[in-house]
Image: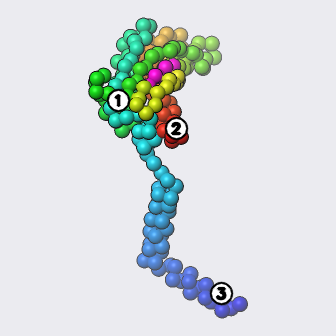
Amino acid sequence: MKQVVGRWSSVARKWKRPSLRIFFLSLFTIHYSLFTLIGCGYKPTTAFTQKVFTDKIYTEIEVYLRDPENAVLVKDALNEAIVSRFGAAVADKESATTRLHVKFNSVSFTPIQYDVNGYAIYYRAKVSLNIRYTSSKKHGTETVSGFYDFPIQPRAIISDALRFQAIKEGSGKALDAFVSRITLRGGRL
């Protein structure tokens, strides 16, 4: 019994050496990092979206008559998502191999919190988009929604600037939901 304790005490003394501790710690860190990134089969989002979409995408936005200025915001957000999340390029209608048609289904504002006097002080904007996509690989239609919560002053109305910002943020979240669904579809192909 004393020999076992003696042997382990010599290992404990060796472990207290800083160079040996740093070596084993760095070895563990490298091993864990490689296992996590390579062993789990990590693939970026663009690997899955390219199974659904091609490399040149054209976007078309149907103007929402209640808020026509929001079409520009949604088009910009969609073009940014194409480049950053799909790994594709925005193209003109003639040279595009994939087309996205975006239509506003609805935009609504709902009070979600009231003060002690009964005045709404927090609102939720809900933006619902209908996105139709056509590609040489696949086609379909998705209806996605995005939400954005924002405060207002008691007894105040929603200003145009606040409404504009809420629709912009809600549209961005709806487009993120669309990207997630397309990524999921690409992973199943």
Mark 1: few/some/many CA within 10 Å (<14, 14-19, 20+)? some
What residue is rendered at 56% in x and 81% in y?
Answer: 12
Q: Quadrant of the N terminus?
A: bottom right
Q: Secondary structure at mark 2?
A: helix
Q: Nearer the viewer, mark 1 or mark 3?
A: 1
| Mark 1 or mark 2: whose residue is earlier in sequence | 1
Q: Nearer the viewer, mark 3 or mark 2?
A: 2
| Mark 1 or mark 3: whose residue is earlier in sequence | 3
- The picture places residue 55, in percent across and down from the top left corner, at 34, 35
Residue at the limit of the structure toward the front, as seen here: 136
Q: Nearer the viewer, mark 1 or mark 2?
A: 1
- The picture places residue 69, in percent across and down from the top left corner, at 36, 13
- Residue with the mark numbered 1: 97
Q: In the image, is residue 164 above or below residue 138? A: above
- Label placed on residue 184: 2
Q: Tell me whether the residue at label 1 lies in contact with that at label 2, contact meaning CB atoms closer than 8 angstroms.
A: no
Task: Residue 98: tell me if it is visible.
Answer: yes
- Residue with the mark numbered 3: 5
What residue is rendered at 59% in x and 12% in y?
Answer: 119
Taking depth in this image into account, of 145 and 182 the one nearest to the observer is: 182
| Mark 3 or mark 2: whose residue is earlier in sequence | 3
Say whether residue 129 is magenta.
Answer: yes
Q: Secondary structure at mark 1?
A: loop
Task: Residue 170: tell me if it is visible.
Answer: no
Spatial CA span between label 3 and label 2:
55 Å
Spatial CA span between label 1 and label 3:
72 Å
Looking at the rendering, the stretch of residues picked out in magenta corresponds to 128-133
Q: Main secondary structure of the magenta part?
A: strand
Q: In the image, is residue 185 above or below residue 132? A: below
Q: In the image, is residue 71 above or below residue 40? A: above
